Image (cartoon, grey):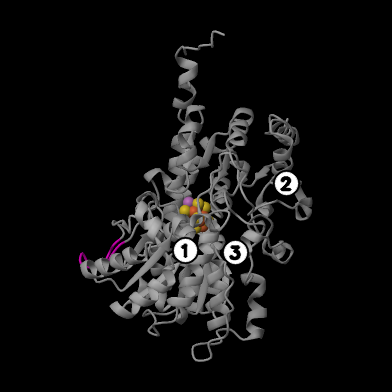
Amino acid sequence: MSKFEMDPTRWKQEVLKSYPSKIAKKRDKSIIVHEGENHESQKIQANVRTIPGIITQRGCTYAGCKGVVLGPTRDIVNLVHGPIGCSFYAWLTRRNQTLPPTPDSPNYMNYCFSTDMQDSNIVFGGEIKLKQACREAFEIFKPKAIGIFSTCPVGLIGDDVHIVARDMKEELGINIFGFSCEGYKGVSQSAGHHIANNALVKHVIGLNDTPAEGKFKINMLGEYNIGGDAFELERIFEKCGITLNSSFSGNSTMEQFERAHMAELNVVMCHRSINYVAEMMEKKYGIPWFKVNFIGAESSAKSLRRIAKYFGDADLMAKVEEVIAEELAIVKKTIEDIYPRTKGKTAMMFVGGSRAHHYQELFTELGMSTLSAGYEFGHRDDYEGRRVIPTISIDADSRNIEELTIEKDEAKFKERLSEEKKAELEKDLQFNEYEGMMKDMEKGSLIIDDLSHHEMDKLIEIYHPDVFCAGIKEKYVVQKMGIPMKQLHSYDYGGPYAGFYGAVNFYKDIDMIANTSIWKMIKAPWEKAETIEAEYAA
Ligand code: CFM
């Protein structure tokens, strides 16, 4: 028998049977049994509305805009226009780290800025309060910029954050811009990424023509410094002699965003959250982009080689090889020790819009296979590859998000690569491309978009994976079922997991959690203690 204790097709049928028929019909399209080589003809339903009551893992549009994309930038005041609950939710509930160059360099990441809307603001409007909050923040912190984030009630009552931003920009003389990222604006946090990307291109990128000092300037897009990942990547780039001109947005500053257009290359890590910026910058400034993955030691090595290849500099290529050899030697030592203990084990991962794919690399390095995976809010291209984008039907929810019309910036556009050179490098670098999760998964694996709680229960009950990866909302439920759980949003306060040191950290953490017997010894509370049951006496 294969590693699937129940045929995945039967698993799917049984799960669907437990839903009301209308819901079963909808979920049917979001659950795919990988057909091996035929997977190219398989289509998954993604980026559609969650079925109410299904208990989704998803977050909201505001979370994607404020928390994810702008959250990690330390010297901008991220002001939430809304009730305090929304502000609290996005206040350091994630582990973006940042490292100001000196102790007195501006860093507002520990603060929670909110207009704290009250009932009266909902009735009479909150714009005056918002202006007041901008003035107050300016007075106290003297920031370079303020970003204003809309929450659901702001959209419902019609406060215009953009007009307030424009007025306050004039009054205070700093860069102030607003985001129409009301929580309900899209079907998930993915819409918030798009809105954040649009505003960065409109209001920030291109304002400062002084590039970072150094050679081989790149921007790293879609890396958010969770658990210190960005620090590890900065270490590697520095060692190789590659200059990180700007980072979107792990360990970033406003200045980095402003000068992003001065880089020679954009490398995109999490394409889901930021491919829009890469695309727009290519059109506007002529910066080519390709996808990289620094999760996994082998993929990190491969990504570095591709960056070196792009610049085509012999010294850089030699240096990169030297760094890779040195780093992989350390990685190898750890993996040789751990591999015999993790080999043959199984994992499942349901995270965001890129990690459920990227982290499979690390598990493969551990000799573990991914039985099932899916994104919370990925789009079809994140599963099936960028080639399917033209076939994705645009629904009302996607139409709700502004599509910017970008034109070439004649003054700042610079051709980095001639058409011939680009064509020559295409085979190795694959510009403007990513192939999606399905290509890397095995025949028979279950690919599930926007996993429901019931489906999670059933995956665990039937297949009992050795490790289940998701987020804090799932963590304790999974552990109570006796399965080790690894958070891949916050890393359970571990990490970094990116790059070479990151891979070593990950191997050790997985070895630890997958090989402890503690989970087999615990029983769920309802199995352990007697429960009191009662019935109505008619
Ligand atoms: Fe990109 Fe992210 Fe992710 Fe994401 Fe996220 Fe995140 Fe994530 Mo949590 S930007 S899609 S919206 S890699 S916050 S840093 S871990 S769900 S897989």
Looking at the image, tell me whether mark 2 or mark 3 is earlier in sequence order.
2
Secondary structure beneath dot 1 equals: loop
Q: Nearer the viewer, residue 310 or 33?
A: 33
Question: In the rendered image, which quarter is residue 343 located in?
Answer: top right
In this rendering, the answer to whether 441 lies above or below 180 is above
Q: Is residue 146 left or right of residue 45?
A: left
Q: Secondary structure at mark 2?
A: loop
- Which residue type does callout 1 highlight? Gly
Residue at numbered disc 1: 158
Which quarter of the rendering shows the N terminus? Answer: top right
Say which amino acid is labelled 2: Lys
Instruction: Determine the image quadrant of residue 271.
Output: bottom right
Residue at the disc numbered 3? 400
Q: Give the residue type at disc 3.
A: Asn
Image point (61%, 42%), residue name: 369
Q: Residue furthest top?
A: 537
Residue 17 rendering spot, x and y as whole percentages: 73, 31
Which sits earlier in the primary sequence, circle 2 or circle 1?
2
- CB-based contact (under 8 Å), mark 3 and mark 1: no
Where residue 86 sits in the image (x, y, percent)?
Answer: 40, 51
Check the image and name the residue furthest to the front: 124
Mark 2 vs mark 1: give the one in front: 1
What span is colored magenta in the figure? Answer: 99-108
Residue 8 in the image: above or below residue 447: above
Question: Overall secondary structure of the magenta stretch?
Answer: loop
Is any atom of residue 214 visible in this view? yes
Please rate how many residues cluster around mark 2, counting C-alpha atoms within 10 Å: few if below 14, some from 14 to 19, many from 20. some
For the residues marked 2 and 1, what is the alpha-carbon distance in whole angstroms? 36 Å
